[in-house]
Image: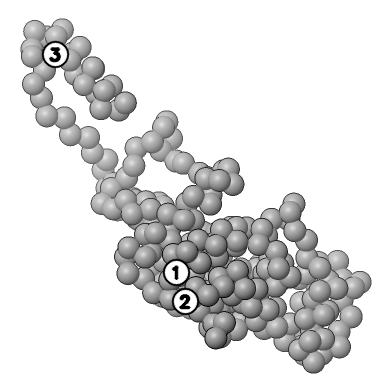
Amino acid sequence: MPRAFITAHVAEVAAAHGDAGDLVVEISIDHGEELARKTWNPRLGILGGLSVLGTTGVVVPYSCSAWIDSIRRGIDVARAAGHTHVAGCTGSTSEKVAVAEYGLPDDALLDMGDFAGAVLKYLRRHPIERLTIVGGFAKLSKLAAGHLDLHSGRSQVSLTHLGTIAAEGGFELDLTDCNTGLEALHRAQAAGVPLGDLVAARAADEALAVLREAPVAVDVVCIDRAGAIVGRCEPRTLS
């Protein structure tokens, strides 16, 4: 349709001036190539310029299906680019941590949001050698409990399960009267219990269970709201 609109308007103006309209039309955006690096285009395999879309030029995948599709395309692009290490991040703060810790390029970052399951299930069919999952402690405690959708409306932090994880790590810790996952983390830290590391390890195990036999090593980094690392585990596989 954009090509049809351009052709029709050029023909109309040309006819008004008695011309045949045999023209070459070039559309450009000042500093477009530079600006494009700040968009999702490189992650989607669109290189060298901006996409001109709609009235604002901004497209946000608001629907669940659109977000999941963008995750899949991001994995496709990372594989096509030959990356052996990608990071599934729950938000912009976790992306910054992934870059700071591992130096990953933009097209190796997967904006998974709450859709951990979408990343894991697609990687199960289209594996990449290593996946690092980076996210807030509370969200990743949900993954550690087996939830694949981390949205607050579809899964909740289980303080009882956090206590179980601590107990299985050899620590007795009562967290049932805490109000939030972050409060539970702070109590654990005050007691010298490495709850962040224990949650990261359990989250990695749950991710590997979804990946099944796919040749993907998984490690997890838990952060607080300021982006400080509060727990992590080394890459691990099912074997």
Query: What residue did someone put label 1 on?
Result: 127
Q: Residue at x 30, y 28 (%)?
A: 2
Q: Residues within 10 Å of mark 2 (few under 14, many from 20)?
A: some
Image marks 1 and 3: residues in contact by CB distance under 8 Å: no
Which of the two marks, 1 or 3, is nearer to us in this view? Answer: 1
Q: What residue type is disc 1 on?
A: Pro
Q: Residue 14 carries which label?
A: 3
- In this view, the residue farthest toward the right is 177
Query: What residue did someone put label 2 on?
Result: 215
Q: How crowded is mark 3: few (under 14 residues within 10 Å), some or many (20 or more)?
A: some
**How far is disc 2 from disc 1 in space, using C-alphas?**
6 Å
Labels 1 and 3: the sequence-earlier one: 3
Measured as percent of width and height from the top left, residue 162 is found at: 79, 76
Q: What residue type is disc 2 on?
A: Pro
**How far is disc 3 from disc 2 in space, using C-alphas?**
60 Å
**For numbered disc 3, what is the local secondary structure?**
helix
Towards the viewer: 3 or 27: 3
